[in-house]
Every structure is written in C-alpha cells, then in structure tokens.
Image (cartoon, rainbow, N blue to C red):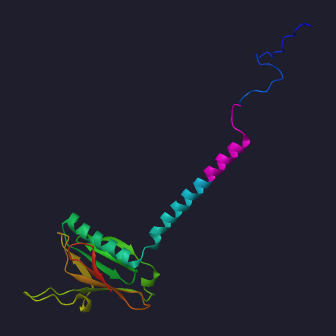
Amino acid sequence: MALKAPMILVTGKQFGKSPTHRVGFTLIEIVLVLGLMAFAAAIVITNFASLADRGDSQSSVEILQSAVRQARYLAASERSTTELRFDKETGSLIIASASGIAETFALDKTFDRDGPGVFLFYLIPPAEGLNTAPAPMRTRLETSHVKFAPDRSSSPFAVNIDTGSGTPERLIFDPFSSLVITSE
C-alpha cells in the first residue's frame, strides 16, 4: 500500500486540521471590555457631576469667607481701601473699591429682599493700654460695612449670620487674614 500525501490548500495549510491557536478577539471578550469601559465612564461622569454641583451648594459661611479673602486681595492689588457690605435688596455680599463695585457674591434666597436672612457686621473695639480687649462676642458696635486697607488688614470685626431660623451664628475674623478666630 502506498502512502498518500496529505491534501494541502492553496494557502499552504493542511486541510482538515484545526489551528493550534486563534488570532483575534472573541465576542465575549469584546462585550466584556465595552462593559468595563461603560462602567468606568459612568463613575467618571457621576463624580464630575457631583463636583460641578458642589459649587452651587456653598454655605453662607463659605461665601462670606470667600468675600473677605477677595476684599483683602483687591485692597492689596489695587492699593486702595475696599469695603465689604451686605445688600438685602439683591441678597448678596458686595465688595466695593475706589473704582466702584468690584465683585458681588450671591447668596441663597434666604438672604434676598423677601427672605428672613441677614448679615450684620460689628466692629470689635481695640484694647486700651495694657487692659485686655473687650469680649468680641458681646460687641454691639454695628456697622454697615467693613473696610480693608491696602496692607490687607482691617479693623477687628465680627459677623452675625441670621438665617431667620434659630440662633444667629457669629463669626469673629482675624484682622490680618480671612481666618475665623472663633464662631458661636
């Protein structure tokens, strides 16, 4: 009996034998990768959306601290006195300088014309001689605005934030920074 040569296709591969390895991706692998990419994209989009919404939900204390920082910065950069005041009509904190209104910090609807909220500014009297300074929590020297000098300093001041519901919150600011010394 004579041996027959195996049939070979035109491409050079033997007919009837399965290849030892496959080239390419299976449908399951492609679907799995697409599913993982969709999951990762959903997480990124959710985190980005929550980060974007975070800016809209600043508290009145955070807005006040931003306004104090900006007022100090503008006083130093323009080399003129700036002032910070609360405007009940617009429900915002306004920074004004010698050149006019520099910036407005909008507050939520609690502080607008029809809302019960209000910001009250109080000056803290300085100590006299070697006496101790008066208790800043008890000061009642109300003022309509706080001034910031070009050296970024201000008179010591306190701010009452009254939202109209409950006890007002009092913040006492450091005269040389935007840090809150104490809060009540």
In this rendering, would 163 be left or right of 139? right
Q: Quadrant of residue 174?
A: bottom left
The reply to whether residue 54 is in sight is yes
Q: Residue at x 73, y 28 (%)?
A: 20
In this rendering, would 66 be left or right of 16? left
Q: Which residues are magenta?
A: 22-38
In this rendering, would 111 be left or right of 10? left
Q: Residue at x 61, y 50 (%)?
A: 37
Residue 176: give x, y in percent of width and height: 20, 73
Residue 31: give x, y in percent of width and height: 69, 46
Magenta residue check for 24: yes
In which quadrant of the rendered image does the C terminus lie? bottom left
The reply to whether residue 112 is in sight is no
In which quadrant of the rendered image does the N terminus lie? top right
Which residue is situated farthest in the top direction here?
2
Magenta residue check for 106: no
Q: Quadrant of residue 144?
A: bottom left
Which residue is situated farthest in the right direction here?
1
